[in-house]
Image (cartoon, rainbow, N blue to C red):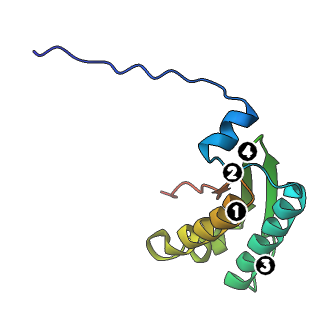
Amino acid sequence: MGAESVKVIKVVRSSPAAKAESGAAPLADNITEIRERAREFLLSALKMLAPDTEGIGVDVVVGEKTTQYIVSCPKEAIGRVIGQRGATIMSLRQVLGAIMGAAGARAVIEIPYYPAEK
């Protein structure tokens, strides 16, 4: 057996000035408005994907730099939301990530889990 090497990574919290010098995008001044508009965009896209389904909604959990968009969706519409091989939800995640990235934040879309019935 060979010797295993372990790489130690040191996490250092940097100041806003250091972040500005490193090229990290600062949060936009109107980040709450951008988060709400992104939520409305996501909700309208989901309603277009499953127009005849009631109960589709989006809840928002706000972190310091990350915003979670939690989709509430009935079991009947989950296939339309995810899409074939996850293409639809991946596209929505990419668009929302671009919108929030321009504002200096990160977006995560979570969808419900329905266990397989046996």
Q: Nearer the viewer, mark 2 or mark 3?
A: 2
Q: Earlier in the sequence, mark 4 or mark 2?
A: 2
CA distance separating discs 4 and 1: 12 Å
Dot 3: few (<14), some (14–19), or many (≥20) neighbours within 10 Å?
some
Picture coordinates of residue 24 (x, y %)? 64, 47
Q: Earlier in the sequence, mark 4 or mark 3?
A: 3
Look at the numbered disc 3 and give the secondary structure of its residue.
helix
Return the x and y of residue 58 as percentages of the image width and height.
79, 62
Dot 2 amino acid type: Ala
- Secondary structure beneath disc 2? loop
First in sequence, mark 4 or 1: give its number: 4
**Image position, residue 42 (x, y; %):** 74, 71
- Badge 4: few (under 14), some or many (20 or more) residues near its Cα, within 10 Å? some
Q: Is residue 118 left or right of residue 27?
A: left
| Marks 3/1: CA–CA distance | 21 Å
Kindly identify the amino acid type of the residue bearing the numbered disc 1: Ala
Q: Earlier in the sequence, mark 2 or mark 1?
A: 2
Q: Name the secondary structure under disc 4.
A: loop
The residue wearing badge 1 is 102
Which numbered disc covers residue 44? 3
Mark 2 vs 1: CB contact within 8 A = yes
Gap in angstroms between the C-alphas marked 2 and 1: 8 Å
Q: Residues within 10 Å of mark 1 (few under 14, many from 20)?
A: some
**How many marks do you count on the picture?**
4
| Residue of label 2 | 25
